[in-house]
Image (cartoon, helix red, strand yellow):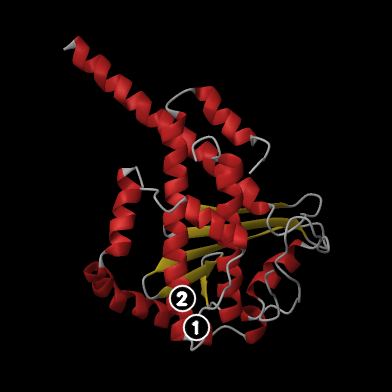
Amino acid sequence: MLKKLRSGLSSQKDVQRRAELYRKLLRHEAQIGGELFGPVQPGGRREFFCLDTHTWVWHEEWIDQNGQHQYTTTRYDMRPGGVVKSQNGQYRPVTPQEARNLLNAIRMYRQRVTSELYAFAA
Amino acid sequence: MSVAMHDGAKEVLSLGNDPEHVGQAGIARIDTAWQVAEGSISALLTWQGEPLEVPESPEVQQYAQQRQDFVPVTAGVGESARYAQDQTAQAEHLAAAEAAVNAVEFVAADVPMAETHAPAPAKIIKPTTTIPYDSMNAVNAFVSNQGSAN
């Protein structure tokens, strides 16, 4: 009984540890992804990352002219028939140029994250 | 490729909890995500009458060659890879996806042009070049018809 309980707790801890590790890796990926588009203004923050195999996220924060904190979160859902984009919760169309930009950004992301973050496992 | 080890890689290695497996899972997720994105964007452009024509750099071709024999290792990624290859599943989801895309078009029709087509002309750029310190420009450039990637 005690053995089972210990085993269960150990397994649970392992799952939690893996989840935490996954979150940490995503944060590092997001940091690398945020560097793909050039510098960020002081007080701003930019993240671009692969949330899962079908979802890409761009998060941008900045201080506007009135000193107000602003943000935009853009989410691209990859579907078999196309791309569904939502920005701050609202659906938006994806132009052909944006689609190409996105593909290029993903290509650069893949190159950099694999060679910098996961080089030890490649 | 000689690149300094990223802090994230150091962190993973320092945890000592099967880092190679974790790293391979990360690579598999991104590899699959790349393939899925290429398929989705290609489908989108074809649907819009603009077939995908993005030349691959030698570095990308070399990278693809290196990764040619890579097999996804985690269950989750494996499922996604199988999904991507499963033509039947794709056919079943196609109608739903098209409906979703059409719904987006419907929503977009109610949004003023100024909001859907941001005006700032800028470019997606490589890390070695610079853009003005304007975060909104970067976002707008990405969605702008005038933006371009190099």
The single residue placed furthest to the top in the displayed view is A2
Find residue A79 and report its horizontal and vertical position in percent.
39, 69
Kindly report the distance in space between the C-alpha atoms of the residues bearing marks 2 and 1: 7 Å
Q: Is residue B102 left or right of residue A114?
A: left
Report the residue at 25% width, 65% height from top: B86
- For label 2, the SS is helix
Residue A52 in view in this figure: no
Find residue A95 and report its horizontal and vertical position in percent.
57, 80
Residue A38 position (above or below residue B12) = below
Q: Quadrant of residue A9?
A: top left
Q: Which residue is mark 1?
A: B51
Quadrant in the picture for the N terminus of chain B: top right
Q: Are marks 2 and 1 in contact (CB under 8 Å)?
A: yes
The amino acid type of the residue labelled 1 equals Pro
Q: Quadrant of residue B138?
A: bottom right
Q: Quadrant of residue A70?
A: bottom right
Q: Which residue is mark 2?
A: B42
Q: Is residue A19 left or right of residue B78?
A: right
Report the residue at 30% width, 25% height from top: A11
